[in-house]
Image (cartoon, helix red, strand yellow):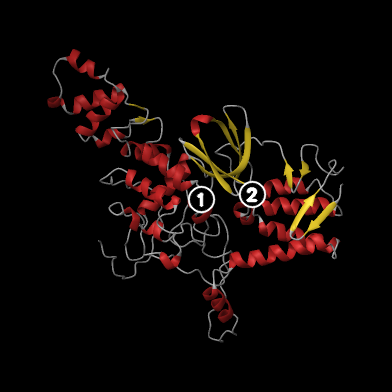
Amino acid sequence: MGSMILTGSVTMLALSSPSPQMPQHAVITGVGWTEPVAEPEPEDAEPKDNETDVQEEEGIRECVITLQSGRTITGELVFESSREVIIGINGIETTFQRRNVANVVVLPPVSERFEQLRATVSDDDVESRLALVEWLRARRAYQLAIKELKSILIVDPQNPHAKLLHTWLNEYDKLTQNAGDEKADENQASEEPADETDEPERIYNIERNSLPHLSDEQINLLRVYEIDLRDPPKLRVPDETMLKLMREYPNKFSPDEAQRQKLLLLPEVEKLKLLFTHRARHLYSEVQVLENPRSLQLFKDQVHTGRGWLMNACASTRCHGGVDAGSFRLINTKPNTNETSFTNLYIIEKSTLANGTPLIDFEYPERSALLQMGMIQSKALIPHPELPRDYPGLGFRPIFRDTQDRKYQQAVEWIRAMYQPRPKLDFDYPLPQSKPTPKPDLPKP
């Protein structure tokens, strides 16, 4: 190993060659690790049995993008859609037009890569382990970094670099867990001795829930109802479906068989218009929608898998993706698939607050409870409920700063893109029921 120079709070590592214990495919450079581009996991990959909540939530979502020119860039995946890719490079968000991007590879979670790297370093190789801590810190995996530092300080209790990092990370972790003076006051009050009549401490079950996905047929029907005829996705209306339509509505079509046969040659979207015109809802399920309509793609790109939004915030196992989430539960397995995205969309649209207020307000999207409860609580029309003091985790963390936040505006755009008026889709799906409590409805403007 080379030398380590500690300057203030910045640590620089000078390494002439990888340690003998380091893997041949990973070497330390500066304060980071150079790794090969990992092959992306298939979208339908099941989560590992030993996957923990820290592994799911810790660290940034890192990716490698390859431009059409052949240049590769590594950074934090901030946003990805069919039009653009936004990545964070040294804390600065950089936008690339999708037409200029050849490929986007999302790297495995930080915790998973850390385990692989840590397995190649011996316990007494303190310098390499400290470089790994810096690697974790750069990827904002603070809890993992603190855990590793505690282990390092057992091996080398007087190491100045380890002691400095441990102090910094612990102080930063305190800041992320305390949302202000009010939260600190609540924590202090909770330390008072409990009365003998107090209820026993609740034991929370931090496990992923086992909600099922919508079927392929249900998702296809959801797609049908979201089709905008002015901008239709690729679709196919089988000839047999058109023949059924003509047989069921004989007075609406020509008695000349040759004329009816011409209808089978119409563009697919014109066939669909005929189904819609005759409101042949029982035939909609036979339409084969081959790609997502715009509204559903907006939800998948801008809401469901975006950084710090539905998957990374609301649907984590410690939140609405767990078994202790109450009546509003989301799925967090196979997050990038249509089946998870659109099952969660169906759950959201069918869910209400205790007073019956829908989570999505299609008439006034900006007022939607789903968005308001993601706002900083002091600025929200409908603040997110306070979590129990003893609930494990970092507590509520807002998604949106205010209504001008880019993620908030994108969510409003998605809601406005949804088909109006809303179709009444009542799938055979086990939605949890909440206990209603009488509360006044919110006033409309």
- Among the two numbered marks 1 and 2 on one chain, the one whose residue lies closer to the N terminus: 2
Give the camera-side residue of 36 and 115: 36
The image position of residue 167, as x and y in percent, is: 73, 66
Q: Is residue 50 left or right of residue 353?
A: right
- Kindly identify which numbered label has been placed on residue 136: none
Give the camera-side residue of 83 and 292: 83
> Hey, which residue is sitting farthest bottom in the picture?
196
- Residue 163 in view of the camera: yes
> Hey, which residue is sitting farthest front in the picture?
7
CA separation in Å, label 1 and label 2:
19 Å
Residue 206 lies, with reference to residue 106, above or below; the image says below
What residue is shown with label 2? 49
What residue is shown with label 1? 311
Please, what is the three-letter code of the amino acid marked with disc 2? Answer: Asp
The image position of residue 28, as x and y in percent, is: 78, 44
Residue 26 lies, with reference to residue 264, above or below; the image says below
Q: Which residue is drawn at the image coordinates 60% and 52% (left, top)?
A: 56
